[in-house]
Image (tube, rainbow, N blue to C red):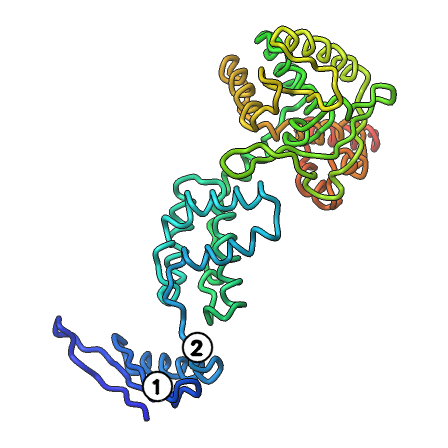
């Protein structure tokens, strides 16, 4: 039996409430009734009551878990760890610990609403956190899992509206050096007298390899006879900042990259310099596991080291501020500009999808835009 009635609130205003009989729980034999209040109109109360009856008919007497979101995340995370590499689940937990759980971690699952997630997303966006979409996606993954596990009957994250950062598009589009800028960068970098940094960025700019791939590189990966480098591993971070060597990002990332003669000659020079420097520190570098780039303990460089080198030269010489990843984009852009096909660039970069290469790296450069008009005029020729 159901009943909708008007009542007076403490502040003197009126509202509507309903009491509804939902039947008998087959598992416990208990009669199930519920009361809901606070509706502004009788129609609003009737709609809420109809939805409640429909949900009960569809899902039975399933009760939403009143555990906090954090507890459900921990259940999801235990299973998630068995599906990805250590470096991946460590980074995921860092995102939750630093950003997601402080916002919604304490909210019980039976009270978690879309507005809670929307508010968190808006906060990250306004704070300028470029990974706000990734944080949202993680929340959504946990809630999709909770739905599949029949912990919740609805995913509140599915109705979140993601803000659009138009300024970010411009920043990412400009995140590379054109030919003139690249030459100037290396002139400035040369003045810092850091041969390892110079060789590092030369390798990135002239091969297009990823930062993690370059940091895990061994001298035995380099074929000086055929001017090729084998990419078979990548550096990543595990729990507590522990450095790991993992397989590359995708199957296509396992590849052989071709290298120009000058860069190969410079690598030979760097190998001699490295041997002398590390020998003075008591390390013998003539072994099959010797890193191409290493610290003064002859172990892998931390992932932030290239960024430190880059910021040092950018700030000192007031250069265009780019990321380390910009040198991969620079290679792709200049390779296409020089006449390489997208398929050739895709193979060199190790993209599993041709579309990835086309979508990310084929912005028309300033030089190409200027050349288009002249090429047309030369062809039409009147």
Question: The residue tagged with tag 2: helix, strand or loop?
Answer: loop
x, y percent for residue 85: 61, 45
Return the residue at label 1: 32
Q: Quadrant of the N terminus?
A: bottom left
Instruction: Give the residue at mark 2.
Output: 62
Query: Residue 342 is drawn in which quadrant?
Result: top right
In the image, residue 56 lies at what x, y percent? 43, 82
Q: Nearer the viewer, residue 148 or 139?
A: 148
- In the image, 25: left or right of 210? left
Q: CA distance from mark 2 to mark 1?
A: 12 Å
- The image shows a total of numbered marks equal to 2
**7 up-or-down from 179: above or below:** below
Label 2 neighbourhood size at 10 Å, few (<14), some (14-19), many (20+)? Answer: some
Residue 215 in the figure: left or right of residue 77: right
**Quadrant in the picture for residue 200:** top right
Q: Quadrant of residue 66?
A: bottom left
Which circle marks residue 271 in the picture? none
Instruction: Looking at the image, tell me whether mark 2 or mark 1 is earlier in sequence order.
Output: 1
- Labelled pair 2, 1 in contact (Cβ < 8 Å): no
Q: Residue at x 65, y 24 (%)?
A: 178
Foreground: 248 or 178? 248
Q: Does 47 sit above or below residue 370?
A: below
Label 1: how many Cα within 10 Å (few below 14, some 14–19, many 20+) = few
Residue 6: percent from left, percent from top = 21, 83
x 37%, y 57%: residue = 116
User: Mark 1: which secondary structure?
Assistant: strand
**Residue at the limit of the structure toward the right, as seen here:** 225
Query: Nearest the camera: 314 or 352?
Result: 352
Q: Position of residue 244 (x, y in %)?
A: 61, 34
């Amino acid at each position: 039996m159901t009943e909708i009635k008007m009542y007076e609130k403490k502040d003197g205003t009126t509202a509507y409430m309903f009491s509804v009989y939902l039947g008998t729980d087959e598992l416990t034999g208990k009669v199930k009734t519920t009361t809901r209040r606070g509706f502004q109109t009788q129609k609003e109360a009737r709609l809420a009551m109809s939805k409640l009856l429909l949900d009960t008919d569809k899902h039975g007497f399933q009760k939403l878990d009143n555990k906090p979101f954090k507890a459900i995340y921990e259940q999801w995370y235990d299973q998630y760890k068995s599906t990805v590499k250590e470096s991946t689940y460590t980074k995921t937990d860092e995102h939750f610990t630093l950003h997601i759980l402080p916002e919604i971690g304490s909210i019980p699952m039976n009270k978690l609403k879309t507005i809670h997630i929307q508010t968190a997303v808006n906060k990250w966006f306004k704070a300028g956190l470029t990974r706000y979409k990734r944080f949202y996606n993680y929340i959504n993954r946990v809630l999709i899992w909770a739905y599949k596990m029949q912990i919740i009957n609805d995913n509140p994250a599915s109705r979140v509206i993601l803000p659009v950062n138009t300024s970010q598009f411009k920043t990412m589009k400009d995140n590379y050096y054109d030919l003139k800028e690249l030459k100037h960068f290396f002139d400035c970098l040369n003045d810092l007298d850091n041969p390892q940094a110079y060789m590092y960025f030369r390798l990135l700019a002239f091969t297009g390899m990823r930062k993690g791939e370059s940091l895990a590189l061994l001298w035995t990966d380099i074929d000086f006879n055929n001017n090729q480098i084998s990419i078979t591993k990548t550096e990543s971070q595990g729990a507590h900042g522990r450095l790991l060597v993992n397989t590359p990002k995708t199957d296509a990332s396992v590849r052989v990259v071709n290298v120009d003669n000058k860069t190969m000659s410079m690598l030979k020079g760097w190998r001699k310099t490295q041997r002398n420097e590390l020998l003075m520190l008591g390390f013998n570098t003539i072994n099959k596991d010797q890193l191409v780039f290493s610290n003064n303990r002859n172990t892998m460089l931390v992932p932030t080291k290239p960024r430190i080198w880059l910021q040092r030269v950018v700030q000192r010489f007031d250069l265009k501020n780019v990321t380390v990843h910009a040198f991969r984009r620079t290679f792709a852009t200049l390779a296409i500009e020089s006449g390489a096909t997208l398929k050739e660039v895709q193979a060199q970069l190790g993209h599993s999808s041709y579309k990835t290469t086309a979508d990310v790296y084929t912005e028309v450069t300033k030089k190409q835009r200027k050349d288009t008009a002249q090429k047309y005029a030369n062809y039409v020729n009147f």
